[in-house]
């Protein structure tokens, strides 16, 4: 059925759904900013942070991140609030009685969910990463007292390129120096060179490592050549940033940079690859939730209930928070090696809630 009346109904639902979504976001963001500002105002004043940096570096990056992180909550509340009002005013009954099927009624809702999903996808891929870079730099400069180094500053192993392996017994972030540094080169499963040094200090002027008291062994079949010295410079595929990469630094990477980082981390056997894969998959899985949660919200709230609008909103809040909580648990399962595949873990909430959505859709009034 594609009559002018139905087209008017489509525009009405789309306008009200998206309007409620935007209004919900504005109210939630305002509340979050007030609480966040009240918590950090003392630090801002004590460190005399310029107002321009607070607004354009911190909150300009903080707001898109908050909006995207809690978009499932905003979608669910918007859909369930608007649909509950239609049901309470008996408009849903009138629409269905007029010959419009429940399936056809879902069309403008799904179109709206598609707009929200596309917005979330664009935010996650193109807007939030550069905005996060400013936000994280601001936090490290004014809020946190020092940069967060790698998880383990002892016994660090890296494969810096095919056949090249680095081992560091201890890294000092205060001196930017790796102690008991070892670089091995392996070809055809045989070691061909081994460099050992008492320390390797990062030289930022030329991007090299200054080795002290080094010892080099080059293997040629059954023989070997040994070289020693007090100091030398070496340039390898390892920089100081590899030791200082923040756990949440992946949030500031573009899709291309994130994929490049994943390839490097996979080659090196870097444990932080789990966080990179979580970020990559969540950028796609999160927007898809708009479709699933919209179906659940409409199916739940399309029937007029004795509890009214308050009951539906309560159910909506519980389900949307459970989705976000489930998503966080899925990330934790990846980090704890309970679920080996980050892609599977990040899509499990969508899959399970999609099953719930299908059941509720079949039970919804026709």
Image: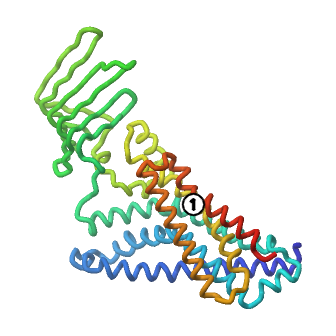
Q: Using the image as rendered, state which of residue 3 and residue 363 is in the foreground.
A: 363
Q: Position of residue 117 (x, y in %)?
A: 62, 65
Q: Using the image as rendered, state which of residue 234 and residue 200 is in the foreground.
A: 200
Q: Position of residue 39 (x, y in %)?
A: 31, 79
**3 relative to 264 in the view: left or right:** right
Query: Residue 304: which quarter of the image?
Result: bottom right
**12 relative to 126 in the view: left or right:** right
Q: Which residue is mark 1?
A: 349
Residue found 57% across the figure and 55% down from its top: 347
Q: Residues within 10 Å of mark 1 (few under 14, many from 20)?
A: many
Q: Tell me the SS state at disc 1.
A: helix
Report the quarter where the C terminus lies: bottom right
Residue found 16% across the figure and 37% down from its top: 199
Report the quarter where the N terminus lies: bottom right
Q: Position of residue 58 (x, y in %)?
A: 37, 70
Outermost residue to the top: 222
């Amino acid at each position: 059925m594609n009559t002018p009346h139905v087209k008017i109904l489509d525009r009405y639902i789309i306008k009200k759904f998206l309007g409620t979504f935007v209004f919900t976001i504005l109210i939630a963001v305002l509340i979050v900013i007030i609480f966040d500002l009240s918590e950090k105002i003392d630090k801002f004043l004590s460190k005399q942070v310029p107002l321009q940096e607070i607004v354009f570096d911190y909150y300009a990056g903080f707001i898109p991140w908050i909006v995207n992180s809690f978009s499932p909550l905003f979608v669910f509340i918007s859909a369930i609030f608007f649909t509950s009002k239609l049901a309470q005013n008996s408009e849903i009954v009138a629409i269905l009685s007029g010959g419009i099927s429940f399936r056809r009624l879902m069309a403008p809702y799904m179109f709206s969910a598609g707009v929200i999903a596309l917005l979330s996808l664009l935010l996650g891929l193109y807007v939030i990463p550069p905005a996060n870079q400013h936000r994280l730099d601001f936090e490290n400069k004014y809020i946190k007292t020092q940069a967060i180094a790698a998880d383990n500053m002892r016994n660090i192993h890296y494969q810096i390129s095919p056949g090249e392996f680095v081992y560091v017994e201890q890294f000092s972030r205060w001196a930017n120096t790796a102690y008991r540094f070892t670089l091995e080169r392996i070809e055809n499963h045989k070691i061909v060179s081994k460099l050992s040094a008492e320390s390797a200090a990062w030289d930022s002027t030329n991007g090299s490592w200054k080795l002290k008291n080094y010892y080099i062994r080059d293997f040629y079949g059954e023989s070997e050549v040994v070289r020693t010295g007090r100091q030398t410079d070496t340039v390898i595929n390892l920089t100081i940033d590899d030791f200082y990469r923040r756990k949440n630094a992946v949030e500031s990477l573009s899709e291309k940079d994130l994929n490049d980082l994943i390839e490097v981390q996979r080659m090196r056997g870097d444990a932080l690859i789990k966080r990179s894969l979580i970020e990559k998959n969540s950028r796609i899985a999160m927007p898809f939730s708009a479709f699933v949660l919209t179906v659940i919200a409409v199916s739940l709230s399309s029937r007029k209930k004795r509890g009214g609008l308050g009951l539906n909103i309560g159910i909506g809040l519980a389900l949307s928070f459970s989705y976000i909580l489930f998503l966080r648990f899925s990330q934790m399962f990846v980090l704890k090696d309970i679920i080996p595949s980050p892609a599977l873990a990040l899509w499990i909430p969508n899959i399970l809630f999609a099953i719930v959505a299908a059941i509720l859709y079949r039970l919804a009034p026709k």
